[in-house]
Image (cartoon, coloured by chain):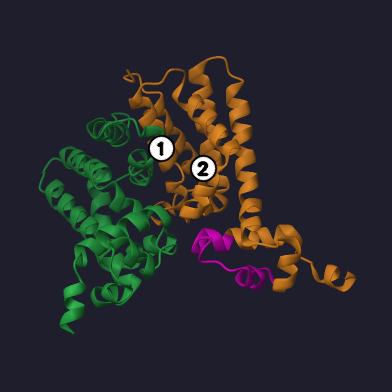
Chain colours: A green, B orange
Amino acid sequence: MSSTAERIRPGRSGILAAATRLFATHGVSGTSLQQIADATGITKAAVYHHFPTKEEVVVAVLAPALEAIQGIVRTAGAHEDPRAATEAAIIGLADQAVTHRQRWAVLLQDAAVEEYVRNNPDHDELFTRLRLLLTGPDPTPGTRLQVSLFLSGLLGPAQDPSCADIDDDALRAGIVRAGRRLLLADDDA
Amino acid sequence: MSSTAERIRPGRSGILAAATRLFATHGVSGTSLQQIADATGITKAAVYHHFPTKEEVVVAVLAPALEAIQGIVRTAGAHEDPRAATEAAIIGLADQAVTHRQRWAVLLQDAAVEEYVRNNPDHDELFTRLRLLLTGPDPTPGTRLQVSLFLSGLLGPAQDPSCADIDDDALRAGIVRAGRRLLLADDDA
């Protein structure tokens, strides 16, 4: 099968880059392995060689996003002061939302993808830890709600056509400012 | 065809209620007309009688949501003071996000649905007016970004399992508080 192997040029990373673009635009259910092959410039058989199912492409596209969250939880969790931990988590999330906006858009485009992330016990534990860093210990229901709104909203600006004129640094700064207002305001009783 | 007409018992509203539940959970692309028929307790032919295509079901499910936004824009737009207009829009949106959370969840579940809403010129104009009420006149890029984050985030809390223990009044109040913090903070320069 060496002739097949030679044809696999763009390889995993090329397939994943094309898949991320397609998923982010059309959703996972709106994207076929054939479309991924066409966008990568390889045959469907070559895609199958790396990823026998579309689910495996989705898992591979999301893996770096989940690793990034692990990194944020680790870094923010190293702070002893809960407010410093919250601030570190906000800054890390804002950077992800802007720098890797296309990867994160995949999560927004499909009910099935969110379900996959939510129903994995490892992810569930990871997001529980992230939420706790954002709320601080023993949060009130009101604080949990602000965290929920921030987490739902933070991917919005970098995806939003009405913010397309705002450069990346201003996007990051604005998301951080929103996070501070929602989660570090003084009237948080 | 009177025998067919007689069999259409749950009618349009029953079909739309079932479709809203299914779309909100599985996304539009994950829901078939057959599933809508089964959930309504009628035949697929009876669904076809009211809605020849799934797209027409989607349009009918979203119509009340878009009418509600028209109502909010009208009510908020009647305020002369821009801050009072922003506050009225926040309160109206918070109520929609909580009271009609399932209808709004449909928008979150599918790239295609959001695209449909976004690509309709009438909707586009409506959301432009809504954004302007939320930002106030001549907004800075920073203010537009806060509005974008609020609009992306406001549907989150009422959908979020981690907020499932928060009652509707507290959800509404918390979303309004978030909106005030993001859009009516004094350091909005």
Q: Residue at x 36, y 41 (%)?
A: A146
Q: CA distance from mark 2 to mark 1?
A: 10 Å
A157 sits to left or right of A172: right
Mark 1 residue crowding within 10 angstroms, few (<14) / some (14–19) / many (20+): few
Q: What residue is shown with label 1?
A: A161
A51 sits to left or right of A71: right
How many numbered dots are placed on residues in this image?
2
**Pointer 2 and pointer 1: residues touching (CB < 8 Å)?**
yes
- Quadrant assignment, res B12: bottom right
**Residue B160 point in image, percent of width and height:** 42, 53
**Residue B31 point in image, percent of width and height:** 55, 66
Q: Which stretch appears magenta? A: B21-42
Q: Quadrant of the C terminus of chain B?
A: top left
Q: What residue is shown with label 2?
A: B118
**Residue type at numbered disc 1:** Pro
**Chain of the residue displaying label 1:** A
